[in-house]
């Protein structure tokens, strides 16, 4: 379903979607109110949602859309403005699965179409948690990895990788982690560069910890959160007894910028495997290679389960590879992380 007050935008998106094999536009709506009414009789897999509309805006409508269309994934189409970034990040934290920037005039080109169709296919189940195979694989992985405690070295850093659907999962998980957990938290989330400062502010509010963007020379400190920049991977090196970050723009095999793999690989070397890595919802396989290096060096890998993932690509890759010691919901992952805190501290 395409929800946008602009007839031109609805028409362009409809043509793009219907040009993709196996994809169809079930319905369109010129307002959020009409979309909510139409969804009661028209089931859809994915909603393309504009946030800036007359009447009920996309943010206000989001909870009702999620409630009315249970199991439907929402792809937010966001403007390039700072206000647009704030609204989009709020929508993602509330449960929207992913975002695409609405291009300027002339920007609806073939590259944009390919990216749009890729996201729709992933959210609709072609690469996500919606397929029966992924659900079955996810249940097997969850049964095989239930031990909440690390099975390797005691971690000195918590590193989190996420993409599509990961912001909502991250918020749910971080709510379970109290100030008693003092390890540094590093986060690589696939986001447009312009969204990263907004994301960092939201994380700081959500978890009540000082949150910094990991620029060149940023020190990783206990009790703080470091966020990968949007223009480089977060690399970590040890200088004496300190951990220092350095962004890298070197292309990653995953094609992501920033990528989870370089973060995990550099942490593996800097911390000699003493890392707890958590892979949350996301399309693709970013994080798999870094997790393999970590697991081989005594690190511990947790992953989000298929049932709660918008897309079980990234967490599914590490789970299917047999690298995980826990596959669970974001809330359960947060509780397992808290179990690492000594009883005397709680």
Image: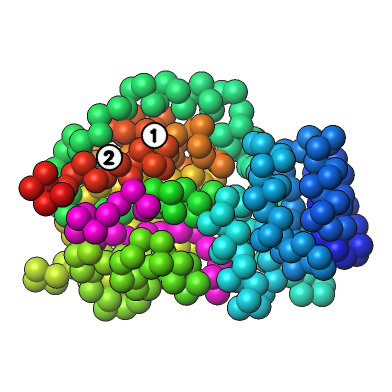
Indicate left or right for 83 with 163 as reference. Answer: right
Total numbered labels placed on residues in the image:
2
Point out residue 194 in the picture as x, y percentages from the top left corner.
55, 74
- Using the rendered view, name the quadrant where residue 188 is placed: bottom left
Depicted 197 relative to depicted 287: above or below: below
Depicted 136 relative to depicted 88: above or below: above
Point out residue 11 in the picture as x, y percentages from the top left corner.
90, 57
Look at mark 1 in the image and give the residue it sits on: 328
Q: Give the range drawn in magenta.
A: 174-195
Q: Which dot marks residue 2?
A: none
Q: Can residue 264 be seen in this view?
A: no
Look at mark 2 in the image and give the residue it sits on: 336
Depicted 239 relative to depicted 288: above or below: below
| 68 in the magenta segment | no
Label 1 to label 2, Cα distance in Å?
9 Å
> Does the residue at mark 1 contact the one at mark 2 (Cβ under 8 Å)?
yes
Residue placed at 44% from the left, 54% from the top? 171
Indicate left or right for 77 with 253 as reference. Answer: right
In-front residue for pair 69/276: 69
Point out residue 258 in the picture as x, y percentages from the top left corner.
45, 63
Q: Can residue 204 be seen in this view?
A: yes
Point out residue 146 in the picture as x, y percentages from the top left corner.
30, 27
- Using the rendered view, name the quadrant where residue 265 is placed: bottom left
Structural crowding at the residue carrying mark 1, measured as other residues with C-alpha within 10 Å and reported as few (<14), some (14–19) or many (≥20): many
For label 2, the SS is: helix
- Using the rendered view, name the quadrant where residue 130 is placed: top right
């Amino acid at each position: 379903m395409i929800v946008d007050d602009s007839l031109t935008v609805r028409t362009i998106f409809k043509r793009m979607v219907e040009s993709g094999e196996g994809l169809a536009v079930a319905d369109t709506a010129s307002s959020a109110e009409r979309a909510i009414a139409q969804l009661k009789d028209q089931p859809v897999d994915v909603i393309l949602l504009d946030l800036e509309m007359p009447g009920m805006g996309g943010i206000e409508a989001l909870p009702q859309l999620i409630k009315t269309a249970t199991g439907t994934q929402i792809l937010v189409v966001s403007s390039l403005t700072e206000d647009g970034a704030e609204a989009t990040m709020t929508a993602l934290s509330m449960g929207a699965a992913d975002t695409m920037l609405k291009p300027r005039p002339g920007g609806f080109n073939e590259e944009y179409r390919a990216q749009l169709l890729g996201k729709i296919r992933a959210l609709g189940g072609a690469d996500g948690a919606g397929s029966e195979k992924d659900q079955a694989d996810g249940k097997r992985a969850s049964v095989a990895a239930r031990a909440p405690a690390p099975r390797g070295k005691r971690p000195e850093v918590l590193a989190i990788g996420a993409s599509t659907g990961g912001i909502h999962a991250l918020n749910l998980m971080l709510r379970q982690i109290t100030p008693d957990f003092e390890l540094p938290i590093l986060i690589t989330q696939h986001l447009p560069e312009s969204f990263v400062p907004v994301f960092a502010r939201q994380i700081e509010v959500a978890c009540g910890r000082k949150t910094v963007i990991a620029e060149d020379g940023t020190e990783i400190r206990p009790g703080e959160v470091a966020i990968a920049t949007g223009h480089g991977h977060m690399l970590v090196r040890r200088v004496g007894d300190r951990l220092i970050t350095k962004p890298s723009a070197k292309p990653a095999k995953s094609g992501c910028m920033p990528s989870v793999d370089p973060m995990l690989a550099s942490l593996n070397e800097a911390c000699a495997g003493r890392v707890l890595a958590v892979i949350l919802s996301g399309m693709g396989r970013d994080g798999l290679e870094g997790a393999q290096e970590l697991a081989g060096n005594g690190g511990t890998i947790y992953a989000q389960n298929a049932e709660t993932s918008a897309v079980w690509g990234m967490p599914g890759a590490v789970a299917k590879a047999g690298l995980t010691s826990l596959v669970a919901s974001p809330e359960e992952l947060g509780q397992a992380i808290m179990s690492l805190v000594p009883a005397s501290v709680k």
